[in-house]
Amino acid sequence: MNYKGLLFDFDGTLLDTNNLIIETFYQVIEPKFPGKYSKEDMANFIGPSLSDTFTMVAPDRVEELTNEYITWNRLHHDELVREFDFVVEVLTDLKKAGIKLAIVSTKRQEALLRGMNLMGITDLFDTIIGNDDVKNTKPHPEPVLLALSRLGLEKNEVIMIGDNYHDIEGGQNAGVHTAGVAWSLKGTAFLETYHPTFMLQTMKDLYDIVGVPAHA
């Protein structure tokens, strides 16, 4: 297969924001609903949009909780995130080899750019799609189809890559190939139940999949 583009989720795929996200949810929710959710429960909030999550928690307080989440998350972002292995190296090689790269995330553009700038990878991407660019977030196909349109690529030329079910289902709903990542907090067994086209053990697996030598 001749892949020309790769679409990446961001949180939990390129940047390890799991601890940040869980801690932010805890700081926002625990004071208002003491003991209702453990930190293990809050791990299940990783992936869906803030609106979807807070609608489930307290449908009459979505705006309030979202604003508190954004404020706390901004203050503690840089201290609580870390890079996954080989991400910057592999993305740089893929870009040099002419592969088109996109972010397709349920996160806001502002928050995405903060994390990407911290990693120094912003200039590697041809387009960045956050939840403020679409009406429907993953697993709806709209974000993936928007990425294809912006990149000028066909469905059979790209892979949607992510750490959660909505990444895989979003890619499948859009008719593209998909890849799960073994470093997902959800684990490979969980992701395999959604039948991704590929399962990446490390970012370096992408070299063989797209036919790009390391350090192109």
Image: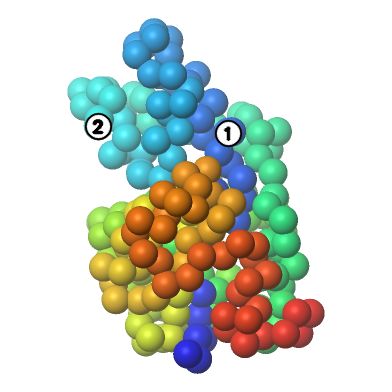
Cα gap from disc 1 to disc 2, whole angstroms: 20 Å
Q: Are marks 1 and 2 in contact (CB under 8 Å)?
A: no
Residue 175 drawn above or below residue 187: below
Q: Is residue 95 left or right of residue 136?
A: right
Q: Position of residue 148 (x, y in %)?
A: 38, 78
Judged from this view, the residue extending furthest toward the right is 215
Res 99 visible? no
Q: Nearer the viewer, residue 7 or 204?
A: 204
Residue position marked by numbered label 1 in the rendering: 20
Secondary element at tag 1: helix
Q: Nearer the viewer, residue 199 or 160?
A: 199
The residue type indicated by label 1 comes to Leu
What residue do we see at 63% from left, 81% from top? 208
Quarter location, residue 63:
top left
Q: Is residue 13 left or right of residue 51?
A: right
Residue position marked by numbered label 2 in the rendering: 55
Quarter location, residue 126:
bottom right
Q: Position of residue 103 (x, y in %)?
A: 50, 64
Q: Nearer the viewer, residue 195 or 98?
A: 195
Q: Position of residue 98 (x, y in %)?
A: 62, 87
